[in-house]
Image (cartoon, rainbow, N blue to C red):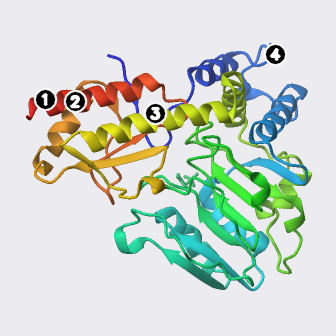
Amino acid sequence: MKKYNFYAGPSILPQYTIKNTAEALIDFAGMGLSLMEVSHRSKQFVAVMDEAQALFKELLNIPDGYSVIFVGGGASTQFAMVPFNLFRKKTAYLNTGAWSKKAIKEAQGFGDVDVVASSEDKNFNYIPKGYSIPEDADYFHITTNNTIYGTEIREDIDSPVPLVADMSSDIFSRPVDVSKYAIIYGGAQKNLAPAGVTFAIIKDDILGKVEHYIPTMLKYQTHIDKESMFNTPPVVPVYAALQTLKWLKDLGGINEIHKINKFKAGLLYDEISRNPLFTTTVPDPADRSIMNICFVMNAGYEKIEQEFFDFASSKGMVGIKGHRSVGGFRASTYNALPIESVEALVGVMQEFENLHK
Ligand SMILES: *Cc1c(COP(=O)(O)O)cnc(C)c1O
């Protein structure tokens, strides 16, 4: 049976990425060797790394004065790397969910953290507004897409201090004005590559200002200076990331995928609001993510939640269970998810509605 992959992460990748990476695992660049068994310093792999960095910059329109690095450790290591490289006296964070909280915890290990606003009072079902960012903070940290709760800061905000963003689950989903950010980072396993590679986009002139020792591997400058080759990079995921970037470029780039993403999300949000059996978990449409769409059974239908899950599963829907802290359902509509998958899910919701009229 056809499967429709709505997993939140690791998650769906383009068939182009999977096929080309599988081929390179057998024979990489005509070398007669697997991608897994060649030196990362071979000229063939160095070319992959160079092209991945160049295409990353091209697709996101990254201005001069920024570096792109690919490292290991996941976004979770970036939670500590950011303060290690930027924290001097005090910093500021916006608390929009479990990932923000983990980032805040790491920063607190370095000193004073001003949590300027939080949506924890309503289980993170909205994006706080009207907060002020202290002008004496070394940086201000946000999580643009809250993968668990289905909320998203969909526009680049203005910050009086260097802006740092965790974009693990919405990088490459929409145009971003990189010049407004000092650092953008994320794990690749939501919209780009298999797990194992983490990207960071760093404004070069914000580095070199802290006085404490920064462990070599946690120092951005180490990886910038060695073009992500200070130590052995995650070779296979970097190769896969390059395939996804090529796929995205062929498709028309970020503006094109943004249109498709808005269309897909619109289809599903419209059905959630139309279908009497379901309801959204994010009341303000402006705060709704176009990558992770959360919904629950409407009042009176809670008892048939498991029945809907089983029904949808029997129709090939995979990965739609909501995170345990929200419950209900979550459909992740990342770049690689075809429009037909969303249409299929909407069809299943309508069939289920007809069974319960
Ligand atoms: C998945 C996720 C993370 C965690 O990423 P790891 O690479 O597993 O450390 C952090 N932030 C956000 C927004 C995520 O979606």
Q: Are marks 4 and 1 in contact (CB under 8 Å)?
A: no
Q: What residue is shown with label 4?
A: 31
Which residue sits at x=59%, y=59%?
Answer: 76
Between 292 and 284, the residue placed more toward the observer is: 284
Classify mark 1: residues with Cα within 10 Å, few (<14), some (14-19) or many (20+).
Answer: few
Residue placed at 29% from the left, 44% from the top?
273
- Figure disc tally: 4
Q: Is mark 3 within 8 Å of ligand 1?
A: no
Considering the numbered disc 2 on the image, is that residue within a helix, a strand or a loop?
helix
- Give residue 191's quadrant in the image: top right
Ligand 1 picture quarter: bottom right
- Mark 4 to mark 2 CA distance (whole Å): 51 Å
> Residue flagged by tag 4: what amino acid is it?
Met
Looking at the rendered structure, the kind of residue marked 2 is Gln
Q: Which mark is residue 350?
A: 2
Element under label 3?
A: helix
In percent of width and height, residue 265 lies at 44, 38
